[in-house]
């Protein structure tokens, strides 16, 4: 079946979704916007109902951006750890919203914090996924200097996901910024190397290079479009595939 993007759709049974922390703040400039969190959870719940096994990596930029911390005099490594703590708060918020819809979940943190959630153990996470639980991976990679995009690729590889869905505010990868240039061209498909060479800023270079080496396709789609993810999984939808 062909999508609106004209790209042959595949059937995916195990996916990783990368959400930015900003996706959870709605129209606010900061923090968590409960109705937005609920809306995203209900989309994830509908996707889960399709029988798709879901892994989730969420950023922390709605609570703390490392780079801004650095400009305010916070030591870079400390700023990165503060960002990782932000991802734990977001993971718990999505967990709570999903479980209120009856979806079973487990939060697994790259930095052990036993009182709050499980530590990340790859084989344990695999069992959770096999049992149909949504696995929410918190604390990024657990190391400074890496983004949650890199964490998303790493976990997708470890969890044997077939694809990474990168949720953004636009419905794909554009040659120029579509929020500034209304004639910006959207790619239907693009290679990892082209994305890197053209510096298209979909993901940072480390994450893209890792995805390329692991042969993990990345589907860039809009989180703002209701039902966007489901439409892609059902063979339609609008997106760009990086492969
Ligand atoms: P099964 O092996 O399939 O039974 O998995 P399970 O996750 O249901 O079993 P387990 O008894 O390990 O976990 C029960 C609950 O405790 C789940 O909600 C887990 O997320 C939670 N849990 C397990 N380990 C930890 C931990 O180290 N810290 C925290 N905070 N919760 C944990």
Image (cartoon, rainbow, N blue to C red):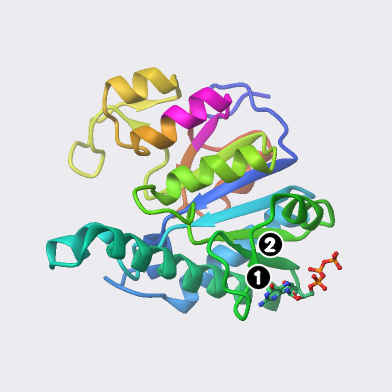
Give the image quadrant in which the ligand numbered 1 is located: bottom right
- Taking 31 as reference, is 45 above or below it? above
| Residue 28 drawn at (x, y percent) | 30, 72
Tag shown at residue 45: 2
Which residue is label 1 attached to?
98
Whether tag 2 and tag 1 are in contact, CB under 8 A, the answer is: yes
Q: Identify the residue at horizontal 67%, vertical 39% (top origin).
A: 161
- Taking 34 as reference, is 161 above or below it? above
| Residue 39 drawn at (x, y percent) | 54, 67
Instruction: Write down the quadrant of residue 23 in the picture.
Output: bottom left
Depth check, front residue: 95 or 77: 77
Q: Identify the residue at horizontal 39%, vertical 49% (top origin).
A: 147
Q: Can residue 210 be found in the magenta stretch?
A: yes
- Taking 83 as reference, is 213 above or below it? above
Left or right for 147, reference 162: left
Q: Identify the residue at horizontal 49%, vertical 61% (top origin).
A: 139
Residue 165 shows up from this direction: no
Q: Which residues are magenta?
A: 209-219
Left or right for 240, reference 92: left
Depth check, front residue: 144 or 11: 144
């Amino acid at each position: 079946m062909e999508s609106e993007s004209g790209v042959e759709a595949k059937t995916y049974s195990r996916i990783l979704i990368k959400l930015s922390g900003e996706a959870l703040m709605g129209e606010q400039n900061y923090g968590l916007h409960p109705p937005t969190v609920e809306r995203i959870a209900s989309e994830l719940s509908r996707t889960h109902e399709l029988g798709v096994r879901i892994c989730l990596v969420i950023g922390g930029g709605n609570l703390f951006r490392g780079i801004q911390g650095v400009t305010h005099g916070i030591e870079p490594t400390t700023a990165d750890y503060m960002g990782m703590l932000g991802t734990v708060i977001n993971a718990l918020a999505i967990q709570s919203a999903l479980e209120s819809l009856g979806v079973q979940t487990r939060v697994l943190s790259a930095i052990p914090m036993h009182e709050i959630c499980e530590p990340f153990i790859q084989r344990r996470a695999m069992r959770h996924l096999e049992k149909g639980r949504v696995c929410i991976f918190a604390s990024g990679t657990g190391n400074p200097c890496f983004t949650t995009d890199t964490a998303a690729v790493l976990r997708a590889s470890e969890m044997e996901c077939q694809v990474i869905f990168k949720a953004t505010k636009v419905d794909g990868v554009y040659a120029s910024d579509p929020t500034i240039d209304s004639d910006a061209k959207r790619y239907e498909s693009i290679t990892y190397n082209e994305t890197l060479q053209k510096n298209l800023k979909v993901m940072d270079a480390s994450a893209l290079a890792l995805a390329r080496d692991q042969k993990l396709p990345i589907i860039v789609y809009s989180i703002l479009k209701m039902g966007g993810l489901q439409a892609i999984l059902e063979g339609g939808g609008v997106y760009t595939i990086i492969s």
